[in-house]
Amino acid sequence: MAGTDRSGVPVVSVTGEVDVYTGPVLREELEKALARGTTGVVVDLSGVAFIDSTGLGVLVTAHRQLASRGGRLHVCAPEGKITSVIALTGLDAVLAVHSALDDAVHAAAPASA
């Protein structure tokens, strides 16, 4: 997992599996991004093969923190298993899910950008 910046938007890129073992690493990267005070953060799940309830819980927690300051968590998850899990859990109604990273970054960018 790595945190980067694209067009002023924090992007956390995740690969492999997001589960009880790697969830804390994702939480730490998201906390770093949230500490910047931004209202838009992108989580790139395009390289993720599996996500469990721990990983989904980390995403929900980050979303709630962003929502408390008028923001939103944006997730890049191309069509596939991860998108299906997000839809089956109903999180697609809460998280902003995008099929392309550029779309997620554009949507998360501050209005003045």
Image (tube, rainbow, N blue to C red):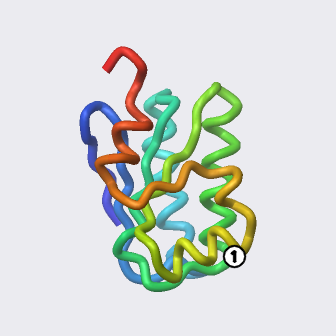
Is 94 positioned to the left or the right of 98 in the image? Answer: right
- Percent of width and height locating residue 70: 64, 26
Label 1 element class:
helix
Is 32 positioned to the left or the right of 92 in the image? Answer: left
In-front residue for pair 77/64: 77
- Percent of width and height locating residue 77: 45, 66
Is 65 positioned to the left or the right of 76 in the image? Answer: right
**What residue appears at the point 36 percent right and 15 percent down from the top-left corner?**
112
On screen, residue 69 above or below 58:
above
Quarter of the rendering occupied by the C terminus: top left
**What residue appears at the point 61 percent right and 48 percent down from the top-left corner?**
62
Tag 1: amino acid: Ser
Quarter of the rendering occupied by the N terminus: bottom left
What residue did someone put label 1 on?
Answer: 53
Q: How many marks?
A: 1
**What residue appears at the point 60 percent right and 58 percent down from the top-left corner?**
59
Q: Quadrant of residue 91?
A: bottom right
- Percent of width and height locating residue 55: 60, 70
Is 64 positioned to the left or the right of 16 in the image? Answer: right
Crowd rating for badge 1 (residues with CA inside 10 Å; few <14, some 14–19, many 20+)? some
On screen, residue 63 above or below 83:
above
In-front residue for pair 1/102: 102
**What residue appears at the point 37 percent right and 70 percent down from the top-left corner?**
46
On screen, residue 19 above or below 94:
below
